Amino acid sequence: MLGQWAYLNKIELDYSRPGKPTDNGLVEAFNGRLRAECLNASWFISMADARQRIEEWRTDFNTERPHMALGGLTPKAFADQIDRA
């Protein structure tokens, strides 16, 4: 399905090379953080429970948690800072 969607939207897929996670280090780092902090740290009793907990983690990660790449600011504080400029 992904291949068909990409073709219909004139998008060329470029896969990482097998065994080379450094081809996309930012995604690999995020995936590791999600796995360690959310997926491995939780028991999900249903798909609805999994969706709710993952959404809560995503919201915290994207709004409340300070990120070193943003100078220790939360993403929300960083965006607010840009909006005031």
Image (tube, helix red, strand yellow):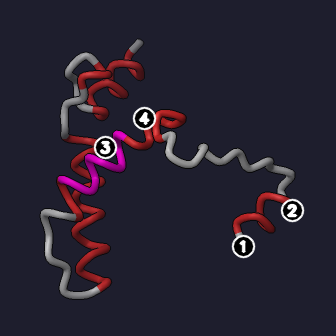
Name the element at disc 1: loop
Q: Is residue 20 magenta?
A: no
Q: Residue at image x 37%, y 28%? A: 79
Q: Residue at image x 86%, y 62%? A: 8
State the predominant SS element of the stretch in magenta: helix
Name the element at disc 2: helix
Mark 2, residue position = 8
For badge 1, the amino acid type reads Met
Task: Specify start and end residues of the magenta stretch as a single range.
Answer: 29-36
Left or right: 16 as drawn, with respect to 62 = right
Which comes sooner in the sequence, label 3 or label 4? Answer: 4
* Gap in angstroms between the C-alphas marked 1 and 4: 25 Å
* Gap in angstroms between the C-alphas marked 2 and 3: 31 Å
Which comes sooner in the sequence, label 2 or label 1? Answer: 1
Q: Nearer the viewer, residue 9 or 24?
A: 24
Q: Residue furthest bottom?
A: 46
Tell me the crowding category of disc 2: few under 14, some 14 to 19, or many 20 or more residues within 10 angstroms, Cα based.
few
Q: Please provide percent x and percent y for residue 62.
A: 31, 43
Task: Name above or below for residue 58 compared with residue 27.
Answer: below
* Gap in angstroms between the C-alphas marked 1 and 3: 29 Å
Dot 4 and dot 2 residues touching (CB under 8 Å): no
Per the rendering, the mark at residue 1 is 1
Mark 4, residue position = 26
